[in-house]
Image (cartoon, rainbow, N blue to C red):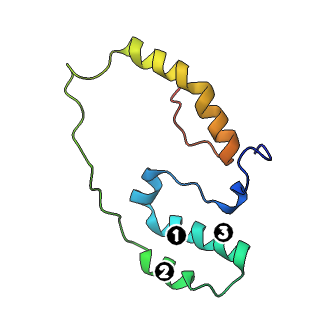
Amino acid sequence: RLPGMLPGSECFVFVSLDEIVHTPGAVLSAIAAKCSELHGEGNGLADCTAAADGLRAPCKNASAPLPDDLAPDELTQFELAAYYRPHNERLFRVIGRDLGWHND
């Protein structure tokens, strides 16, 4: 983590959409733990996280994969990945976790 880059970043819980969709109980538990850490116990989130165990979040924007003729070619994907890599890595340092966006 880079101190001072995101003032108050220790007050945030950064989660991916994949985590929200597949493990909402774990996400709520992480949020509850952060709230307890910042504000003390007894904030009422324990009931919320217990109720979320085993639930799956609705997937409202699901879509089928792109048809082959619309999918970007490998060179374009490589160039985009190379362009965004330093920006993504900086974001990962700021938020204190790697979101797994680099497949290589």
Q: Locate the C terminus and report the quarter of the image it occupies.
A: top right
Indicate the position of residue 98 as horizontal and vertical percent values.
61, 42
Kindly identify the residue that appears in the image at 39 percent across and 58 percent down: 21
- Tag 3, which secondary structure? helix
Q: Which residue is mark 2?
A: 48
- Tag 2, which secondary structure? helix
Indicate the position of residue 45 as horizontal and vertical percent values.
55, 80
Relative to 54, 33 lies left or right: right
Q: Residues within 10 Å of mark 1 (few under 14, many from 20)?
A: many
- Tag 1, which secondary structure? helix
Give how far apart the Cα atoms at labels 2 and 3 are.
Answer: 14 Å
Q: What is the three-letter code of the residue carrying label 2?
A: Cys
Give how far apart the Cα atoms at labels 2 and 1 are.
Answer: 7 Å
Kindly identify the residue that appears in the image at 38 percent across and 15 percent down: 74
Q: Which mark is residue 74?
A: none
Q: What is the three-letter code of the residue carrying label 3?
A: Lys
Kindly identify the residue that appears in the image at 75 percent across and 45 percent down: 1
Indicate the position of residue 75 as horizontal and vertical percent values.
41, 11
Q: Which residue is mark 1?
A: 28
Indicate the position of residue 44 as horizontal and vertical percent values.
56, 86
Kindly identify the residue that appears in the image at 52 percent across and 69 percent down: 28
Relative to 63, 76 lies left or right: right
Q: Residues within 10 Å of mark 2 (few under 14, many from 20)?
A: few
Q: Which residue is mark 3?
A: 34
Q: What is the three-letter code of the residue carrying label 1?
A: Leu
Mark 1 or mark 3: whose residue is earlier in sequence: 1
Give how far apart the Cα atoms at labels 1 and 3 are.
Answer: 10 Å
